[in-house]
Amino acid sequence: MEIVIISIIAFLVSILTFFSGFGLGTIMTPVLMIFFPVEIAIALTGLVHFFNNVFKLFLVGKNADKGTLIRFGIPAVIASFFGAWVLLHIPDIEPLFVYQMFGKTFEVYPVKFTISILLIIFASMDLIPFFSKLQFGKDKLPLGGILSGFFGGLSGNQGALRTAFLIKAGLSKQAFIGTAVVVSTFVDFTRLSVYASRISKSGIEENITLVICATLSAISGAYIGNILLKKVTLKFLQVVVAIMLILISIALGAGLL
């Protein structure tokens, strides 16, 4: 039954995240945690996310802006390696604060709380008319790449910060999505390579059927998302991204993700 539920969620989330450039990994991980231990949930999500990105790379990768890939993508990939390395070599970090709600205990960690604050700031810039007219200069792209890549390697939450910078980089909607997919794929490959020692011990073989079904569902969602892309405007895309950024940031800051 869990294979059906997870596959349906992967399909629906993949359609939505095709536009936003982030969210599949962020949403799928807590869903998988309902059915599996944390380390297995992270490993399974990582594989589905990576293979879905590889499919999208063939689908829209040709639309990526080469200049942005150099200024943003290369720093992101390098920083993701260091973020992943730090994750594997630092001791367990104490929660920033802990609270209880609905009979459950939630822990909020410094890294995710910091990301949530940054995301709220970036999201507000898309919803407030004055800030919506602003764009990040190309000189800010390396900084955005470093931040998104490092936090991606450290916490797995790379997409939201990446999108927050790229959506303001003056790209067309096709170039925005294509660039985000290319960067995401290479960052995924880098951090999964560093995580490999853990992933190999996380029961992947026992859940290969689930990985295949969820991946195919996510790929189907990405295919439909690519068709729907032609019917949306850049302004609609920016609003969707801003709303998702705020929702994800609240969930991260509250310890729900």
Image (cartoon, rainbow, N blue to C red):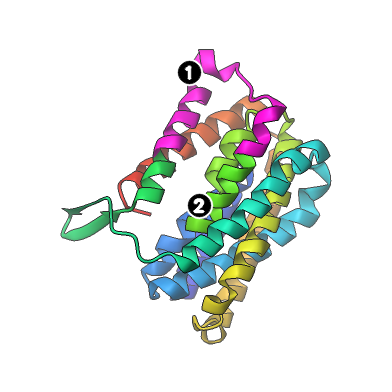
In the figure, residue 176 lies in which quadrant? top right
Cα separation between marks 1 and 2:
25 Å
Q: Residue at x 50, y 52 (%)?
A: 157
* Mark identifier at residue 128: 1
Q: Is residue 67 visible?
A: yes
- Three-letter amino acid code at disc 2? Asn
In the image, taking residue 240 as reference, residue 65 lies left or right, namely: right
Q: Residue at x 67, y 38 (%)?
A: 142
In the image, taking residue 251 as reference, residue 183 lies left or right, namely: right
Q: For the C terminus, give its image quadrant.
A: bottom left
Q: For the N terminus, give its image quadrant.
A: bottom left
Which residue in the structure is indicated by mark 2? 157
Crowdedness of circle 2 by 10 Å Cα count: few (<14), some, many (20+)? many
The span shown in magenta is: 117-143
Residue 221 part of the magenta-drawn span? no
Q: Position of residue 225 (x, y in %)?
A: 66, 47
- Three-letter amino acid code at disc 1? Ile
Instruction: Give the number of the mark in front: 1 or 2.
Output: 2
Q: State whether residue 196 is above or below residue 242.
A: below
Q: Is residue 233 visible?
A: no
